Image: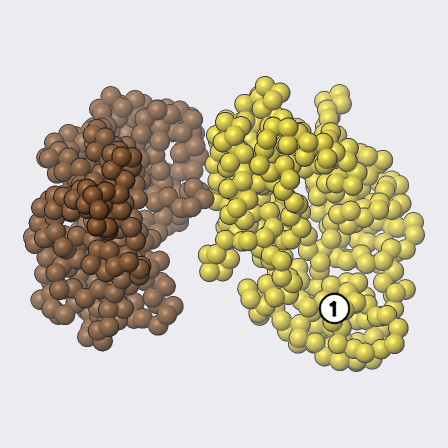
Amino acid sequence: MRGLVAMSGGVDSSVAAALMKDSGHEVVGVTLKLWSGPNGEAPTAGCCTVSDAEDARRVAAQLDIPYYVLDYTDDFKDGVVERFVTDYATGRTPNPCIECNRTVKFDRLLSRLDDFECEVLVTGHHARSLEVDGNWRLLRGRDTAKDQSYVLSMLTQKELARTRFPVGELTKNQVRAVAAGMGLRTALKPESMDICFVGSRDYRGFLREVAPEVFEPGIVVDTEGNVLSDHEGIAEFTIGQRRGLGVAVGEPRFVVDIQPATSTVVIGGLHDLEVFGVTLDQVTWTSGGAIDSEVMAQYRAHGEPVAASLTGSTLDFAEPQRAVAPGQTVAFYDGDVVLGGALIASTLH
Amino acid sequence: MIYLDHAATTPMRPGVWDAMAPFAAERFGNSSGLHDFSRRAKNALEEAREQIATLIGASPMEVVFTSGGTESDNLAIKGTVWNGSSRHGVVTIASEHEAILETVHMLDRFGNQVRIIGVDRLGRIELDELLESLDPATAVVSAMVVNNETGVIHDLALIAKAVKDRDPGVLVHTDAVQAFSSEHLDVGRLGVDLMTITGHKFGGPKGAGLLYVRQGTPLEPLIHGGGQELGRRSGTHDVAGAVGLAEAMHQAVADRDRFTREVGAIRDHFADRLSDIDGLVRNTPGEDVSSHHLNVRIPGVSNETLLVRLDRAGVAASAGSACQSGAAEVSHVLESMGLTAAEARESLRFSFGWNSTVEEADEAADTLVDLVGELR
């Protein structure tokens, strides 16, 4: 088999490439060039900096595999960055890393497999996939603390059949040990936590720079509708936000709702954050077929899954949940098995 | 493996490394010193300078050794804009190399007057537009001899004369990096004040280049220090590099007629073989194209995919000038000629060099024809 390995320059994808090669497969490494700033400058933080590509290149050289940098800056800008801006401009909470997986990494790279004469795409995600009676299943990674199946919950049979996750069977420590054992330069490399195009600064600074037009002044109200102050734009706020609300009141206050049509931000107490369910958009099923049933739902990358029941495109939580926001991804599980995923369209209070 | 990316860099010509090696080893002296070690190094350096000067029709003191094309371009442009005269404007061409364009963009950010002239569909400079853009603030006009991506040749003698006729106070610089293998580059005939050359494009070492600076041309150095190169470029000399540069220039000049004829014939043969590919377009079909470049567009095939497949099949080519990441990005040169971004992403550059053979051209053409058939 010949595998196309998406190499970010981190330890996981380095080891993914090494393990594929070790098990006798032919391997081609690629790094996606996703973002250069408005003035063409390369990012210095996150998962796609120049030095990361350089690490990937060096690892590929050490493994003696062909390696290429592919230019996906246009797709990334159109599919991920503009979506990120639009989401904040419309009061949603985007997850650009999932959007990047969906629209660039999987969609684009899978469509290029033939170009590279490869049968499978290989990534360094901490997740497992296995074929049972001709059906592909997606499972949580062995290392539950590092599990990334949440960000893959939009994958279906079509993608899973042509994707491999070689590090999913390993814990992060085992991954590092493999890398160290092979002398890979990325063995001790820290994980990237930042959004690559935002960097280490606040996302608001990024928005002000690239899309100042989304900042339309509006008002901050309480749950009774009393006007408390004004604000410079709803893009400044996310659901659950506690700081920077511009109001001084005694008890803890949170952003509990954002109403883009009137540029209104609603703040309230902890109990006002409670959400009883959500409506869903872009629902996908790993098995290929829809499921109406009791599921465990996870709506944050490393959040605890919670019991919920799914009816059509409505998900009702067994217990009220806090800090659930439109734009976030929700993944459905049965134990370790990923059933599917969706985007949260709206919350039900 | 077949190497058809000589416009990016070339293998050294035979004897170049041997000429250089002693100065990396036993004759290691610093050319600026009073003892025997220094004298030997200095002698070799000045011999190289004299030899080079003769080969381009200059006098030795007009040759400034640099680290290569990019440094020479930077020195030519910034050095003349910052030379203390009242002129601080730059005029250049949209299809120039990044070493020029990024330099003028930087000057633009710092408030200098920058004018970038377009090219036509065949990559030719709009001379009237260039002349119209000159004004009393113009310090320097920069135009390349041979375009690195398309091979289009600009008539620098004509351009320099037209500029000087319009305003004798304007300096003319040319980036001749791609031209030395095939074009007769005599600074007197060209009528330029500044000319960039770098060794690795014609069988010399990387990291060794020069800027020709006509005597009396005021030039502010970019690198200050010990005052080497008459103060125009400080830093301990790379004697081995200078010796290798001179040797490669000597060989390239001696080989120029053969190169133009034979390498040109190999390139043409390769281009003919590609006519089996339906819809293939030569991006610069005009007469005024160098003997060793070929830029083609293959409709419906991504250049990135094709380059990857060629690489696997053992044929090295490129999409244009190399960027740091190695990603195949949209060529600004082709865009300046009016190609769409989509057309630029279907375009590839094959460039031939002193050791290219017709057998290699045949094999590469077979491979390319097969691959395009597979990918379509």
Q: Residue at x 57, y 27 (%)?
A: A3
Q: Is there any visible trace of residue B267 in the rendered image?
A: no
Residue visible at 50% across and 50% down in the picture: A74
In the visual, does B107 lie left or right of B39? right
The residue that disc 1 covers is A259
Looking at the image, which residue is at 60% across and 38% down? A186
Describe the element under mark 1 as helix, strand or loop: strand
Q: Position of residue A99 (x, y in %)?
A: 64, 48
User: Could you tell me residue A148's position as x and y percent?
Assistant: 72, 40
Tell me the kind of residue under disc 1.
Answer: Gln
Where's residue A315, x and y in %? 84, 49
Question: Residue at the spot x=17%, y=37% of the render?
Answer: B247
Rendered hue of chain A is yellow
Tell me if I can see residue A233 in this picture: yes
Residue placed most toward the observer, B221 or A148: B221
Extreme-right residue of the structure: A319
The chain coloured brown is: B
